Image (cartoon, rainbow, N blue to C red):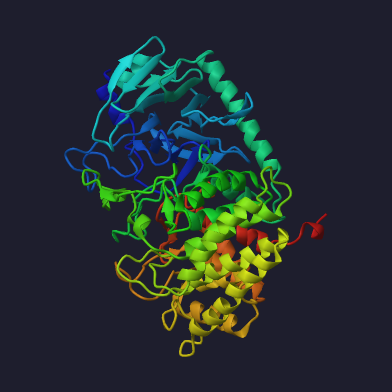
Amino acid sequence: MTAHDDSTHFAPPAAPSLAMGVIGNCAFSALIDARGRIVWCCLPRFDGDPVFNALLQPGAGSAGAGSDAHPSAFSIEIEDFAESRQWYEPNTAVLRTQLYDKSGQGVEITDFAPRFYSRSRFFRPMTLVRRVRPLHGAPRIRVALDVRFDWGRREPLVTQGSNHLRYVGDALTLRLNTDAPLSHLLSRQAFVLTREHNFLLGADESLTEGIADTARLFEQETVSYWLKWSQRLHIPLEWQEAVIRAAITLKLSLFEDTGAIVAAMTTSIPEAPGSQRNWDYRYCWLRDAFFVVRALNSLSEVGTLEDYLRWLSNVVVQAKGGHIQPLYGIGLERDLPESEMPHLAGYRGMGPVRVGNQAQEHFQHDVYGNVVLGAAQAFHDHRLLHRAGLAEFERLEAVGEQAARTYDQADAGMWELRTRARVHTSSALMCWAACDRLAKIAQVLHLPERAAYWQGHAGPMRERILREAWSEERQAFAESFGGRNLDASVLLMIEVNFIDPKDPRFVATVDALETHLCDGPYMRRYEAPDDFGKPETAFNICTFWRIDALARIGRKEQAREIFETMLAARNHVGLLSEDTHPVTGEMWGNFPQTYSMVGVINAAVRLSAPWESKI
């Protein structure tokens, strides 16, 4: 029987969905669907070329697929597929997928990217490891490895060695080392799985040890690394598994080489069906990164903070006291020109696919607060290997001067509106936070004159924000000075200790936001139409801000109910995207979204019963 004849016994690929797991090693990542198919992987780093792009490119004959469609993926399929199960090895970033056929025969796929400490540094090669073993019976499998370069436009030259295949491109060459039959891989011939097979896809380099021995060692060491990393977390009593999974996902979003933290692993997953709100999130937003390190710090994981401060200090020095962009490339790139890839159909055929992000051109004044808040712990925390001192403070003062200059100037705001500028309350709030924290840092450094100077800025700024952001008509803090529209970002007032949560004005604001921005438990960002109309989906981080606000104003039971709803909205392995559809409950937006995973940690820490209540 030919390989072509075999194809009728193999199910078509699962439809694109965010029911995926993520693997990675703080250098790159890959997304794996519920049937063990790698559908997204950018190399050599998060913002690179997607060598596997099936997430954004339906197969031939699918909706939105053009004649030049080249979906690329790495699949291990079972003949007569019946069902799949998928989970993470507890407290690790090692993903296991089991596939069963209609006779009950099964295989198990183990996926991970190696990460462990070796030779006085973290070993994190550009390598995907896939291990497949039979579980029951004598199942037949088919392995299909389709690599594409240049955003799907170029097919590699494939060369064969004794135990490897090379995929040769202009800018990158990948090597697959495997103990599976190369002939079957090249022809996609189905074969009976009688023993474990290993696949190591990565740089075009020879292995120093045997294929099976290398895969086994890498798995043992990687599992050990993650178990020890998770063991050191200071977690709340309740919702421990959710918190650990969120923390590992945030760690995987770190690009350790420079210290940058990506907002998400993907580009162009629409925020809502057919909305064209498709953006590239594979870069480092200073706002999102601050919330990531703050959440991990709350679990006593300060290593990510120290890595991020390396990246952040370079941003501050590079700015020379002037404008700071809201985002940069993970290698500190300033220019991230936005373009479209018309040859790619997009997620479920919902284009466009965008690469780059125009928001790097924006003026978003909250960035100055995010810089100072992100760095502040380094002046106070005695555990850090590299504590900040006078030199770092003087650099941050230049950022504070920008905050003081711009807090009452119109900007694009944190929601990155492309056609409208206002004096956004959230931007003014974060500028105040920059000055307030600089005063506190100056006190720690025994600089009373500088403390007084920054307090002299923060005090009047706070009074003006309270006065001009308040809408008497709406009985709430509005999204801009003198405005009337409501916006969830004003809930950050308590996040940065700007106002007492029990202040009647803040309580009234929470009530107004619940009335006008909430669909049941879910919360939208704002009520005013934007460049694309009114938002259809709920923005997950806003729902988590609501949970925090409710808990702090004394409505803890309501907060817990909403939190349980958000936990139920996660996918089967505990991950969240950016948005949730309030009617269907389906996930939309880029994935996995760091902001959303931050919300899981913050809510659990806020709401959990104390450890001493049980032990």
The quarter of the image holding the C terminus is bottom right
Judged from this view, the residue extending furthest toward the front is: 449
Which sits in the foreground, 456 or 192?
456
Q: Is residue 25 above or below residue 578?
A: above
Residue 346 picture location, percent across and down? 28, 48
Residue 44 picture location, percent across and down? 41, 33
Which sits in the foreground, 501 or 95?
501
Residue 272 picture location, percent across and down? 35, 60
Q: Which picture quadrant has residue 499?
A: bottom right
Q: Is residue 596 above or below residue 63?
A: below
Question: Which residue is found at the position 57% from the left and 79% from the top?
Answer: 460
Q: Is residue 86 above or below residue 372?
A: above
Question: Which residue is found at the position 49% from the left and 83% from the top?
Answer: 468
Which sits in the foreground, 146 or 441?
441
Residue 570 in view here: no
The quarter of the image holding the N terminus is top left
Residue 142 in view here: yes
Q: Is residue 378 above or below residue 581?
A: above
Residue 287 picture location, percent across and down? 50, 58
Question: Which residue is found at the position 34% from the left and 54% from the top?
Answer: 279
Judged from this view, the residue extending furthest toward the left is: 67
Q: How many marks?
A: 0
